[in-house]
Image (cartoon, rainbow, N blue to C red):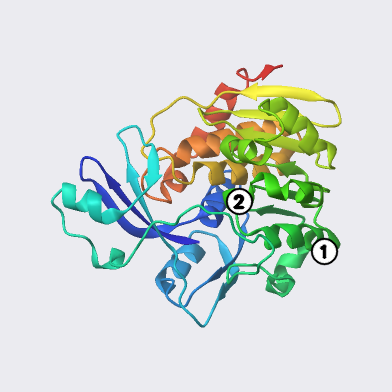
Amino acid sequence: MERDFYLTEQGRALLDVPGGNALYSAVGYRIWEADRQPGLMARVGENYPQAWLSKLRSLGLDIRGVKILARSLEARRFYSLEADGRSALGHPMALFSRLERQLPAALIGYSPPEHQSINHRKRTHHTLRQEDLPGPYQAATAAHLCPVDFLTHNLLPSVFRQEGFTTVTLQPCPEYMEPNIFPDLPALVTGLTAFLPLERDLRGLYKRRTADLWEMAVETASFGCALVVIQRREGGQLLYIRDSDQRWEIPDYPGRSAKQVGEDAAFCGGFLAGYRRSFDPLEAVLHGNVSASLVREGLDPFYALDTMDRLPAARLEFLRGKPRRI
């Protein structure tokens, strides 16, 4: 759960708004399940805006799994946006200066995170523990794990299964998707309903082994994962179904893009909602595809929840004839 700041090259800004993969996944799910409250699990610092938690609750999100630590945590992310919605983490001072705008006080002292190899077995303040699972959540039957540290992803799927969850999906974190964690991949994906990596992250994991995305999907699924869905760099998804050895290519829903931040997380939330509705992997991908299309159309993180009631279903129907079996 993050504090997001956006600035376009034209000077349009949206500063200090709720963000993060957990929030966008919940929005992607909520698009399809207006009558069901997705429960959030996260650890945030005492500096996380408390008013935002009330906002999330008012939008139908269950926040009983959000633990507030007695310390401050860096949760800011600054994105520079191009005209087509493409986004990049950057340093705000340079862009604000070029546009001759004053740097907001909330961004003073901010530096963009740097990708570097880390000890993926080291616990962080964001690492979720078994005791972080609230009692009311234990009656749930499905969960999605957003990108977070390796220890959380290594521990929580088994915890969920012990509690009776029958559907567990996971989007890996780019920080640990490197060749040196490949020996740990079987333990990470065994028992998952679906593994949902971004293409660039899966390529990072397999870069010393193969450049063929289907080979990556087949090998990953062979470790005990029912479905592998690769979110493509240029848009759309590849779906591999292990039990039937089916391979599907699904294009993105065509439309405008205001920002690409959060669309992959929204896809995962929509995928979970779609899978729980039908237990059909292809239908699940199409639901996720629609969720992603709605989220990327607006700068506001909750834009997708204000769309017309019939719009998601109309987009779903449009997409049903588009997948191609490979």
Which residue type does callout 1 highlight? Answer: Glu
Residue 84 against residue 182 in the figure, above or below: above
Q: Is residue 310 visible in the rendered structure shown here?
A: no
Q: Quadrant of residue 296?
A: top left
How many numbered circles does the render carry? 2
| The C terminus: image quadrant | top right
Query: Residue 292, percent across and down?
Result: 52, 38
Which residue is at a point 62% across and 17% down the rendered structure image?
321
Q: Nearer the viewer, residue 243 or 197?
A: 197
- Identity of the residue furthest to the left in this view: 100
Q: CA distance from mark 1 to mark 2?
A: 24 Å
Image disc number at residue 173: 2
Sequence order check: which comes first, mark 1 or mark 2?
1
Q: Nearer the viewer, mark 1 or mark 2?
A: 2
Q: Residues within 10 Å of mark 2 (few under 14, many from 20)?
A: some
Q: Quadrant of residue 106?
A: bottom left
Image disc number at residue 163: 1
Which residue is at a point 71% across and 40% down the rendered structure image?
275
SS of the residue under disc 1:
loop
Query: Residue 50, percent across and down?
Result: 43, 74
Residue 41 against residue 214 in the figure, above or below: below
